Image: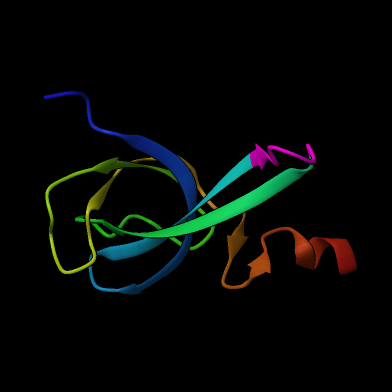
């Protein structure tokens, strides 16, 4: 058996219990015209300890089926989100 796939993406939803939705963005070049094309996929991933927040960059890894749609799990949080409660953390200081 080979190594499990790992992807890095951004958490776009954490409304479910122990589940986050991770957005993976791929940029590829169109084969004929050469234009850069952005392709986006969303993966439900298992977050056992509920450590992820919206906006976090995380690494997810392929795993056995955990539910009807969940086939990935969160391995690590690479970078915490810069926003807190829907506003930037330093936004109050900028306008004071």
Instruction: Residue at the far front: name it.
Output: 32
Task: Determine whether, in the image, residue 51 is placed left or right of residue 39.
Answer: left
Residue 55 vertical placement versus 77 (above, below): below
Most foreground residue, 89 or 29:
29
Q: How far from the left and from the top, in percent, is residue 70? A: 22, 61
Q: Quadrant of the N terminus?
A: top left
Instruction: Residue at the far right: name it.
Output: 95
Q: Which residue is drawn at 64% across and 41% down?
A: 27
Q: How far from the left and from the top, in percent, is residue 39? A: 59, 52
Instruction: Residue at the far top: name it.
Output: 2
Q: How far from the left and from the top, in percent, is residue 53? A: 44, 60
Chain part drawn in magenta? 28-34
Q: Which residue is drawn at 17% across and 69% down?
A: 68
Q: Which residue is drawn at 27% across and 65% down?
A: 19
Q: Is residue 96 visible?
A: no
Q: How far from the left and from the top, in percent, is residue 34? A: 78, 37
Q: Quadrant of residue 93?
A: bottom right
Most foreground residue, 37 or 9:
37
Figure disc tally: 0
Q: Which residue is drawn at 12% across and 48% down?
A: 64
Q: Can residue 69 be seen in this view?
A: yes
Q: In which quarter of the image is the C terminus?
A: bottom right
Most foreground residue, 23 or 50:
23
Task: Determine whether, in the image, residue 78 is placed left or right of residue 16.
Answer: right
Q: Is the magenta stretch mostly helix, strand or loop?
A: loop
Colour scheme used in the picture? rainbow
Residue 22 covered by magenta stretch: no
């Amino acid at each position: 058996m080979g190594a499990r796939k790992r992807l890095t993406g951004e958490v776009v939803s954490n409304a479910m219990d122990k589940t986050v939705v991770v957005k993976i963005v791929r940029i590829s070049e169109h084969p004929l015209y050469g234009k850069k094309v952005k392709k986006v996929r969303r993966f439900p991933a298992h977050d056992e300890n509920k450590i992820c927040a919206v906006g976090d960059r995380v690494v997810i890894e392929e795993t056995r089926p955990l539910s009807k749609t969940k086939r990935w799990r969160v391995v690590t949080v690479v970078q915490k989100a810069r926003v807190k409660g829907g506003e930037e953390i330093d936004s109050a200081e900028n306008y004071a």
